[in-house]
């Protein structure tokens, strides 16, 4: 077997091992056996809501297990074909099997991405907040650049972006903004983007053309549906109203229609000014608060999501997850995964998938250097 093909086979074996570990393979097989048994029980449909939930879990688990088994078998079959072809001197068989293995590599990547987006709330819509760090106009301009970057990313995926609140900067940019991004797996894709983002560039606001470093934070949390019950009462919060701010337009008026709700126990605060009615803004803010509290609970249960804690800390040195350098060289680097791009303009225009996939992959791969069992 050629060294190139051998390396690809080893990579596919490792990827399959990671998928098996993600599924907790032995437990997944037992769970599927139990769900198949429950599906044959006619009394299951006495509770249609519970039945549908179990059937969705069964279908998802069956699809995942079947896919891993098929990929493992296809890899073994094509590896055997290469060995047979080499023994018989049949170059056509070898070439055909090598082509099939390269195709398997692409399938594995697609399967990994599907697995990365299998969390409890990953399929949901998401809220995304951007906050400027210290530094006045520089950081506020950087915050507006980040908001545009995520908006462009969402547009590339044909997701819908709804602006819920924006606080404009004094001279340029924004102090903060909250948007809702609607689309399948919106939260799953964006959940690892929470943290501090650092920009290095020659400032367009500095007459001496000096290089500046700016910081802004991003916070991502899922939109929750009626099936998720978050218990919070008005006695647990402080509700403030204020005049909506922004660049104007049909959704901005001169009354105190904007609403901010602060959860007293955690200090979590959300705000909405998208609607003309204070009542509607208050209702939306309640939805956002429940989502934030739910996201807090998710973090407790998903220890691998600890990177999102960065967004709670000081917006500055030592807490950034990604660095965007425009001068004196061109480089975007994720400080968690090491993924880089030498085209910041593309990244700032929404080309973020490589960064997102790498950070999501860490949730399967775990800590660096952890041994992975070989596929038999």
Image (cartoon, grey):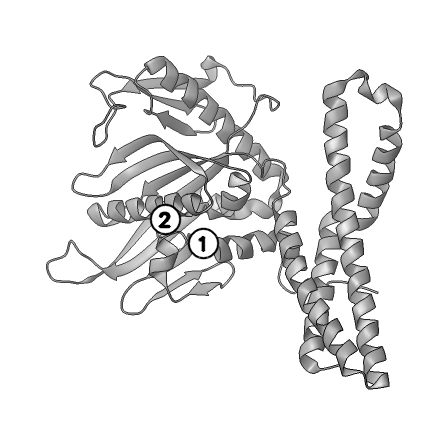
Q: Residues within 10 Å of mark 1 (few under 14, many from 20)?
A: some
Judge by depth and name the residue closer to the eye, 263 or 282. Answer: 282
Q: Residue at x 27, y 20 (%)?
A: 242
Quadrant of the rendered image containing residue 39: top right
User: SS class of the residue under badge 1?
Assistant: loop
> Is disc 1 in contact with disc 2, using a CB cutoff of under 8 Å?
yes
User: SS class of the residue under badge 2?
Assistant: helix
Q: Residue at x 74, y 73 (%)?
A: 96
Left or right position of 237 against 80: left
98 versus 363 height, above or below: below
**Placement of the N terminus among the 4 image quadrants:** bottom right
Q: Residue furthest bottom?
A: 89
Judge by depth and name the residue closer to the eye, 328 or 111. Answer: 111
Q: Residue at x 50, y 15 (%)?
A: 233
Percent x, y for residue 153? 42, 47
Is any atom of residue 133 visible in this view? no
Q: Residues within 10 Å of mark 2 (few under 14, many from 20)?
A: many
Residue holding disc 1: 352
Question: Marks 1 and 2, Cα distance to the nearest angstrom?
Answer: 9 Å
Left or right position of 53 against 215: right
Judge by depth and name the residue closer to the eye, 274 or 131. Answer: 274
Percent x, y for residue 31? 82, 39
Residue holding disc 2: 149
């Amino acid at each position: 077997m050629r060294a190139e093909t051998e390396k690809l086979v080893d990579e596919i074996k490792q990827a399959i091992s990671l998928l098996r570990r993600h599924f907790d393979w032995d437990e997944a097989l037992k769970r599927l056996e139990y769900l198949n048994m429950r599906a044959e029980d006619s009394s299951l449909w006495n509770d249609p809501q519970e039945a549908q939930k179990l059937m969705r879990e069964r279908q998802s688990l069956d699809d995942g297990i079947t896919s891993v088994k098929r990929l493992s078998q296809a890899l073994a079959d094509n590896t055997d074909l290469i060995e047979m072809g080499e023994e018989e001197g049949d170059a056509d068989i070898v070439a055909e099997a090598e082509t099939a293995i390269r195709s398997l590599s692409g399938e594995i990547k697609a399967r990994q991405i599907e697995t990365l987006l299998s969390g409890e709330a990953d399929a949901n819509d998401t809220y995304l907040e951007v906050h400027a760090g210290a530094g006045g106009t520089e950081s506020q301009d950087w915050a507006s650049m980040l908001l545009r970057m995520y908006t462009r990313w969402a547009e590339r995926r044909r997701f819908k972006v709804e602006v819920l609140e924006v606080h404009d900067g004094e001279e340029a940019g924004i102090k903060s903004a909250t948007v809702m991004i609607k689309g399948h797996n919106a939260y799953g894709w964006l959940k690892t983007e929470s943290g501090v983002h650092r920009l290095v560039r020659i400032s367009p606001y500095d007459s001496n053309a000096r290089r500046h470093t700016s910081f802004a934070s991003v916070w991502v949390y899922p939109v929750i549906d009626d099936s998720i019950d978050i218990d919070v009462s008005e006695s647990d919060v402080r509700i403030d109203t204020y005049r909506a701010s922004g660049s104007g337009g049909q959704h901005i008026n001169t009354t105190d229609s904007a609403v901010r709700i602060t959860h007293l126990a955690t200090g979590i605060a959300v705000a909405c000014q998208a609607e003309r009615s204070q009542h509607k803004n208050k209702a939306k803010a309640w939805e956002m608060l429940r989502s934030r509290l739910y996201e807090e609970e998710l973090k407790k249960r998903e220890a691998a999501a600890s990177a999102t804690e960065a967004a709670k800390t000081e917006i500055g040195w030592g807490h950034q997850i990604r660095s965007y350098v425009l001068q004196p060289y061109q480089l975007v680097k994720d400080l968690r995964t090491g993924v880089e791009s030498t085209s910041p303009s593309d990244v700032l225009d929404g080309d973020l998938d490589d960064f997102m996939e790498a950070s999501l992959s860490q949730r399967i791969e775990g800590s660096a250097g952890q041994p992975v069992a070989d596929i038999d």
